[in-house]
Amino acid sequence: MPSSPECGRAQRARGRRARRGAARRLRPVLMTALIASLGLVPLLAASGPGSELQKPLAVVVIGGLLTSTLLTLVLLPMLYDWLETRGEKKLKESL
């Protein structure tokens, strides 16, 4: 069974991997969300007929893009780290 310093090193390494993966995906995820959001700006600025339907749709889609971007870059790495830690604990308990 690994000693406490080894567990700490493994946990720090896993955290570094999660941060490195999130940093690696930062640019493509942000570029995708930004371009899609910029494409919806004309719908937000519309004032002609039908704009009463277009504006709420654009707001919802842009909000969804922002939310999914934050979830992808923040929540998924945290979830990965938590699940890995939990799996390691269960593995240690079974030994």
Image: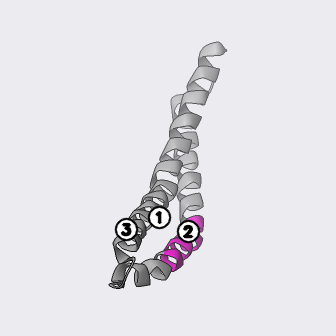
Q: Identify the residue position indicated by label 2 in the image.
A: 29
Give amino acid for label 1.
Leu
Q: Main secondary structure of the magenta part?
A: helix
Question: Distance from label 1 to label 3 (Cα)?
Answer: 10 Å
Q: Secondary structure at mark 1?
A: helix
**Which one is in front, 50 or 38?**
50
Residue at point 42% right, 84% down? 42
Left-right relation of 90 to 42: right
Give amino acid for label 2.
Val
Colouring convention used in this rendered image of the protein: one colour
Q: Identify the residue position indicated by label 3 in the image.
A: 59
Q: Secondary structure at mark 3?
A: helix
**Which one is in front, 62 or 15?**
62
Q: Identify the residue position indicated by label 1 in the image.
A: 65
Quick check: 16 above or below 50? Answer: above
Magenta-colored span: 24-36
Left-right relation of 56 to 10: left
Of the numbered discs 3 and 2, the one sitting upstream in the chain is 2
Question: Distance from label 3 to label 2 (Cα)?
Answer: 19 Å
Residue at point 39% right, 76% down? 50
Label 1 or label 3, whichever lies nearer to me, is 3
